[in-house]
Image (spheres, helix red, strand yellow):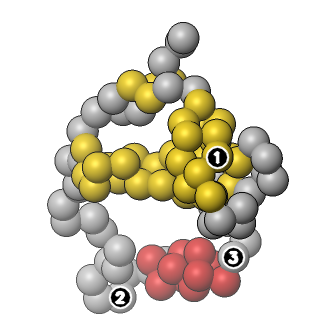
Amino acid sequence: MKIIREINTYCPKCNKHTPHSVKIYSKKPESGLSMGTRRRLRKLKGYIGKVKGQATQKKVAKRQKVLLECKQCGYIVEKVLGGRTKKKIEIKAQ
């Protein structure tokens, strides 16, 4: 799926349609020291009972996210493109 670098769309802060620059959203790596991660590792340790957190099924398609930054006020909005899609997003060279 190809997207152009600049889209004219609605900005909730300006309350009107303005040009937005497009960036592909990428998730940052999770912290290994967060409480949930430490709790999960503690549960996975040892031999008692069933191992928790084993993946049963992997999803085929991902929800593709795009970050839209308003060129006038600098407000950033997340936008999900087309629900679940197999195609990767790439920015088109103009």
Q: Give the residue at the far top of this rendering.
A: 94
Q: Are marks 1 and 3 in contact (CB under 8 Å)?
A: no
**Helix, strand or loop at disc 2?**
loop
As measured in the structure, the alpha-carbon distance from the residue carrying label 1 to the one carrying label 3 is: 39 Å
**Quadrant, the N terminus:** top left
Q: Position of residue 49 (x, y in %)?
A: 29, 88
Which residue matches tag 2? 48
- Residue 81 shows up from this direction: yes
| Residue 68 sits above or below residue 44 on the image | above
- The residue closer to the viewer here, 11 or 1, is 11
Residue labelled with disc 3: 34
Mark toward the start of the polypeptide (2 vs 1): 1
Say what amino acid the circle numbered 1 marks: Thr
The image quadrant of residue 20 is top right
Q: Is residue 44 left or right of residue 31?
A: left
Q: Residue furthest front?
A: 16
Q: In front: 16, or 54?
A: 16
Q: Position of residue 57 (x, y in %)?
A: 18, 60
